């Protein structure tokens, strides 16, 4: 019992089992939205889901019409005619076979051309070339085999030749013969040939597999691009760090990318740029000092740098000191305090005197008299003893002379005077002399000149320095600091050189050992972006290496789940149908034969191989039982096949009478169930030929049945065992004016032979003559044997002679048949047959 009505349920089970958002989306695309292909936006979404950059909320089902009309079945086609055979085996060019009714039964003895006629039907139905020659190999120099045919849908006769190809009407005609029976026995069977697969929607597994494969290919391309980018990035890193021998980044590759985090930490923690620059400058100076010529240049550059730095430092110190004094602000404060002092001194300054003169006088008198405690003292000018008013006046003089206001004014004046000195010092710096320095980099001098110009412009004591001036001061200070470090490096190098070259080399080696890790860390810091990119790609590569192999397991799970669905939805149903056909044809199920269907193949649509005890049925079952299996499979296919014309070529070979009867009944049931199908049966088995007619006639299908007999590869005619029908056909030719044609002669000769057999069976054996017991023969028919009438010896001899004259021996040339037999001779023979019939009928009790 299937767990689900179609494949969607099985695919949903698989989605829950895999439990991945991206796979759930693929299953929904295949099952819900019916998407067999994938566009770029969907690929991007699946990639985002796969890499956990998005969340899955479901897909919108594909829009469908509110009502879906069932597709109209194509009208059933049917075969009308085969004719105009040219060099097609031994079939005569005048042979014309008409298929006027829904059921056509053609009998042909060995050599009659039945097999050749079957070949013409087979080339229309199958794409496999015939393994036997189709041309008339008995005739030399003939052309390609050909014939004409017409189906109901054809407006005119169609021509078949080998150049057209095999199987031009395979969509209409389905063919069964011994070769197909053998193939059905030997080869595994596809249940999909029998079961209509569309309702089960098994295709969604292929869609899911295709979508999964497409996603994997996309991710593999992304993995490949990431790998290429990683290789390129690592190559660039190795090139950048090649000078750092022995360092991990100098030899990094895909196998050693794990060192990246630790190396990046060196760059992220690097903060010694100033120290590194100083050490690099020191190393450069030591390198110069290692040679006599270099030492001379070093000393010259030291001298120039020392002079330049002295000049710059004078400028910087003076400007800084000047601006620190803030002379402009203090000049304003001084004016305010002096104004305040003027107000206080107005009562003390004598007429026609000034404050400055008064202060000068007081400063001269203060050593001679304690101005703040003058009681009892004499005036230093008039030498008179001071009275109370005078003592009070002297105290006020003292306050004016030594008060805080005066101190402030004195301090302000002092600062302003210093500022003027600093301004003078700035102006006196010989900036033009900087141009004579040849060992100092031009860009350093240019920058110093530009900064100094702003500084000098900002050293006007009457104005506040501009922002540009202050910025220039800081810039020049920074440059001076660098130059001071360089000067120190030069001094150290000169000092080392004075101790000898070995000392220089020793210090240089030590310094380089200190510089190398700092330069390495600096290089890492400068390339952090590239290193972080490489680290990200390395992690991505590990991610792909870990995740992508899981696709193989997922695809395997899809195939396995598809096989489960195929097994439950198709194979089990196929077994039931095939078992039903076994019962119909053999009255036993497969188990009674010991037949089991072994599953073959790794794909979802597995094939099944009929076996008995693990052995192929070909080596176990009899030939007749093998034919039962082949026909059972063929009938199972017919239930769902699209072809409307079904051809059976000797379907019951190796059958006993029971199987023949069962086959006739199965064909009858099929015809009743499928009234639009056309059936063509060709046989050389007379028992089957008769029994099939009986079975179909009893089912009321005689009006749809055309029974024909093929003779001598040239003539085919409707077959009848009714005496009246045979006489009517014979008399129609004999009563026609003129001599009958060669074809008419062959026709009436055959019907006269049949008339002899029918007369004997009807009147002599009372219709009870059978080669084998028919299954349909009534067991109570023994009363009919009481009316059997024997032939007289003369009658028997006459009928034997007539049958011989109306037959062509196997050694005779068919082209010469009945050449010397005219209408009168046929009339005589016909009359003799009728006379024997009348005589025997008269003797019947």
Image: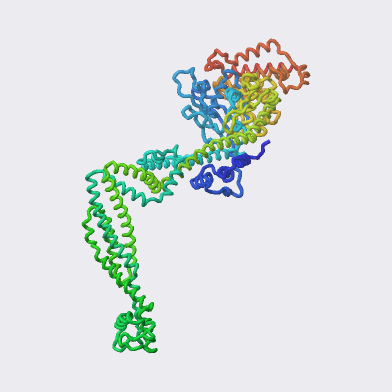
Instruction: State which quadrant residue 649 falls in.
Output: top right
- Residue 213 relative to residue 428: left or right: right
Q: Residue furthest left?
A: 436
Coloring scheme of the render? rainbow
Q: The N terminus is located in which quarter?
A: top right
Where in the figure is residue 3, as x and y percent of width and height? Answer: 67, 38
Of residue 734 and residue 677, the one placed in the foreground of this image is 677
Q: Residue at x 71, y 11 (%)?
A: 792
Where in the figure is residue 542, as x and y percent of width and height? Answer: 49, 40
Instruction: State which quadrant residue 250 falls in.
Output: top left
- Residue 743 relative to residue 456: left or right: right
Where in the figure is residue 833, as x and y percent of width and height? Answer: 66, 17
Q: Residue at x 26, y 57 (%)?
A: 308
Of residue 96 and residue 510, the one placed in the foreground of this image is 510
Above or below, 753 against 442 in this view is above
Where in the figure is residue 740, as x and y percent of width and height? Answer: 56, 22
Is residue 199 visible in the rendered image? The answer is: no
Image mark count: 0
Q: Residue at x 56, y 49 (%)?
A: 55
Q: The C terminus is located in which quarter?
A: top right
Instruction: State which quadrant residue 623 falls in.
Output: top right
- Residue 482 relative to residue 578: left or right: left
Above or below, 204 against 334 in this view is above
Is residue 70 visible in the rendered image? The answer is: yes
């Amino acid at each position: 019992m299937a767990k689900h009505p179609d494949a969607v349920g099985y695919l949903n089970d698989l989605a829950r089992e895999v439990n991945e958002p991206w796979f759930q989306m693929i299953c929904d695309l295949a099952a819900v939205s019916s998407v067999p292909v994938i566009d770029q936006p969907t690929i991007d979404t699946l990639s985002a889901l796969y890499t956990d950059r998005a969340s899955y909320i479901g897909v919108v089902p594909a829009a469908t019409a509110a009502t879906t009309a069932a597709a109209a079945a194509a009208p059933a086609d049917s075969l009308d005619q085969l004719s105009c055979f040219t060099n097609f085996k031994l079939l005569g060019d005048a042979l014309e076979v008409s298929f006027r009714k829904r059921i056509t039964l053609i009998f042909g003895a060995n050599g009659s051309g039945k097999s050749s006629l079957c070949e013409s039907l087979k080339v229309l139905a199958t794409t496999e070339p015939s393994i036997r020659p189709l041309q008339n190999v008995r005739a030399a120099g003939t052309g390609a085999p050909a014939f004409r045919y017409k189906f109901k849908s054809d407006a005119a006769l169609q021509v078949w030749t080998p150049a057209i190809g095999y199987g031009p009407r395979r969509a209409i005609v389905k063919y069964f013969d011994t070769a197909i029976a053998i193939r059905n026995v030997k080869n595994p069977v596809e249940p999909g040939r029998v079961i209509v697969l569309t309702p089960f929607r098994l295709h969604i597994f292929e869609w899911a597999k295709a979508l999964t494969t497409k996603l994997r290919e996309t991710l593999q391309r992304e993995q490949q691009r990431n790998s290429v980018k990683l290789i390129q990035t690592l190559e660039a890193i190795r090139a950048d760090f090649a000078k750092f021998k022995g360092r991990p980044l100098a030899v990094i590759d895909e196998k050693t990318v794990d060192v990246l985090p630790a190396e990046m930490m060196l760059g992220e923690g690097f903060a010694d740029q100033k120290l590194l620059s100083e050490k690099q400058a020191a190393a450069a100076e030591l390198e110069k000092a290692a040679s006599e010529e270099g030492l001379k240049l070093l000393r010259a550059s030291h001298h120039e740098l020392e002079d330049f730095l002295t000049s710059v430092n004078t400028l910087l110190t003076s400007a800084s000191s000047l601006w620190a004094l803030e002379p402009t602000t203090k000049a304003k404060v001084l004016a305010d305090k002096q104004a305040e002092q003027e107000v206080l001194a107005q009562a003390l300054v004598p007429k026609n005197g000034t404050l400055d003169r008064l202060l000068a006088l007081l400063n001269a008198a203060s050593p001679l008299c304690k101005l703040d405690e003058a009681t009892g003292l004499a005036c230093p000018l008039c030498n008179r003893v001071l009275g109370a008013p005078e003592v009070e006046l002297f105290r006020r003089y003292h306050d004016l002379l030594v008060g805080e206001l005066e101190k402030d004014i004195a301090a302000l004046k002092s600062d302003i005077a210093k500022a003027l000195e600093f301004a003078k010092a700035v102006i006196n710096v010989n900036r033009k002399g900087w141009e004579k320095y040849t060992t100092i980099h031009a860009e350093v001098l240019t920058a110093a000149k530009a900064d100094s110009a702003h500084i000098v412009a900002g050293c006007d004591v009457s104005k506040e320095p501009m922002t540009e001036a202050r910025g220039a001061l800081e810039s020049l200070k920074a440059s001076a600091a660098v130059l001071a470090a360089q000067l120190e490096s030069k001094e150290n190098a000169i000092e080392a050189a004075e101790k000898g070259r070995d000392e220089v080399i020793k210090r240089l080696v030590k310094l380089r050992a200190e510089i190398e890790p700092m330069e390495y860390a600096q290089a890492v810091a400068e390339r952090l972006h590239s290193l972080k990119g490489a680290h990200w790609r390395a992690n991505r590569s590990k991610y792909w290496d870990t995740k992508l192999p899981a696709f193989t397991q997922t695809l395997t799970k899809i195939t396995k789940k598809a096989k489960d669905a195929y097994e439950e939805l198709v194979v089990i149903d196929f077994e039931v149908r095939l078992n039903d056909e076994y019962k119909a044809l053999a009255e036993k199920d497969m188990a009674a034969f010991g037949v089991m269907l072994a599953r073959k193949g790794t794909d979802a649509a597995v094939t099944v191989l009929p076996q008995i005890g693990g052995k192929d049925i070909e080596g176990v079952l009899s030939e007749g039982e093998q034919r039962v299996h082949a026909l059972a499979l063929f009938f199972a296919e017919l239930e769902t096949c699209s072809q409307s014309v079904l051809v059976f070529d000797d379907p019951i070979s190796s059958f006993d009478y029971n199987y023949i009867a069962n086959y006739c009944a199965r064909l009858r049931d099929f015809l009743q169930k499928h009234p639009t199908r056309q059936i063509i049966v060709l046989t050389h088995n007379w028992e089957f030929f008769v029994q099939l007619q009986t079975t179909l006639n009893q089912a009321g299908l005689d009006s749809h049945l055309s029974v024909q007999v093929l003779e001598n590869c040239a003539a085919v005619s409707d077959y009848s065992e009714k005496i009246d029908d045979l006489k009517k056909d014979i008399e129609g030719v004999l009563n026609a004016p003129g001599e009958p044609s060669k074809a008419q002669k062959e026709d009436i000769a055959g019907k006269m032979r049949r008339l002899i057999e029918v007369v004997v069976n009807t009147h002599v054996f009372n219709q009870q003559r059978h080669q084998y017991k028919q299954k349909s023969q009534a067991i109570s028919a023994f009363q009919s044997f009481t009316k059997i009438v024997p032939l007289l010896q003369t009658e028997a001899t006459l009928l034997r002679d007539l049958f011989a004259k109306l037959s062509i021996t196997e050694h005779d040339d068919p082209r010469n048949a009945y050449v010397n037999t005219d209408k009168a001779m046929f009339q005589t023979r016909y009359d003799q047959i009728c006379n024997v019939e009348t005589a025997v009928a008269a003797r019947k009790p």
